[in-house]
């Protein structure tokens, strides 16, 4: 079965634990719903955050959603001038027979500016 990548991003309202977890949970649930994923389909998830978010790991939101058997990794995004502030990005690796063209990438809140084509 092929592995496909599904991208997504959102922004946290503030650099607080609650804001980071809430934004991340909303994003993950939107990706799962849009792509009709079962947890068993998800092989791993890479999270990145901009350097202005350090109050909590976004991967904790996945654990709180019950994603206990999925490999999760977090990192800090490059600090690019003019980049979207308080941004949380994800890359899900999923096992699916669907073609890459059917993967639905989700951009929420202030991160919609990252993908004007979506």
Image (cartoon, rainbow, N blue to C red):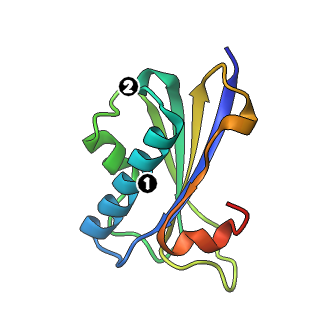
Of the two numbered discs 1 and 2 on the same chain, state the one appearing first in sequence. 1
Q: Which label sits on residue 39?
A: none
Q: Position of residue 106 (x, y in %)?
A: 56, 54
Q: Position of residue 113 (x, y in %)?
A: 63, 74
Give me the residue at 35% from left, 33% from top: 67
x%, y% of residue 33?
43, 40
Cβ atoms at labels 1 and 2 below 8 Å apart: no
56 or 8, nearer to the observer: 8
Q: Nearer the viewer, residue 56 or 3?
A: 3
Residue drawn 49% across and 45% down? Answer: 31
Number of numbered discs present?
A: 2
Q: Secondary structure at mark 2?
A: loop
Q: Which residue is mark 2?
A: 69
Relative to 101, say whether 19 is above or below: below
81 vs 91, left or right, is: right
Q: Residue at x 73, y 63 (%)?
A: 117
- Residue at 58 percent of width and 29 percent of height: 94
Q: Quadrant of the N terminus?
A: top right
Residue for badge 1: 27
Image height check: is 86 above or below 59?
Answer: below
Q: CA distance from mark 1 to mark 2?
A: 19 Å
Residue 50, position as x, y percentages in the image? 54, 70
Give the residue furthest to the top.
1
| Disc 2: CA contacts within 10 A as few (<14), some (14-19) or many (>=20) | few
Quadrant including the C terminus = bottom right
Element under label 1?
Answer: helix
Q: Nearer the viewer, residue 36 or 64?
A: 36
Rendered view: 68 above or below 97: below
Q: Quadrant of residue 89?
A: bottom right
Q: Quadrant of residue 79?
A: bottom right
10 Å neighbourhood of mark 1: few (<14), some, or many (≥20)?
Answer: many
């Amino acid at each position: 079965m092929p592995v496909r990548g599904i991208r997504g991003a959102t922004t946290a309202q503030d650099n607080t634990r609650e804001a980071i977890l809430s934004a991340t949970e909303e994003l993950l649930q939107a990706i799962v719903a849009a792509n009709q994923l079962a947890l068993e389909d998800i092989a791993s998830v890479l999270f990145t955050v901009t350097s202005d978010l350090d109050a909590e790991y976004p991967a904790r939101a996945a654990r709180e959603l019950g994603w206990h058997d999925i490999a999760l990794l977090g990192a800090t995004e490059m600090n690019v001038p003019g980049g979207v502030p308080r941004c949380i990005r994800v890359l899900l690796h999923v096992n699916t027979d669907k073609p890459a063209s059917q993967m639905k990438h989700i951009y929420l809140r202030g991160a919609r500016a990252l993908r004007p084509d979506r």
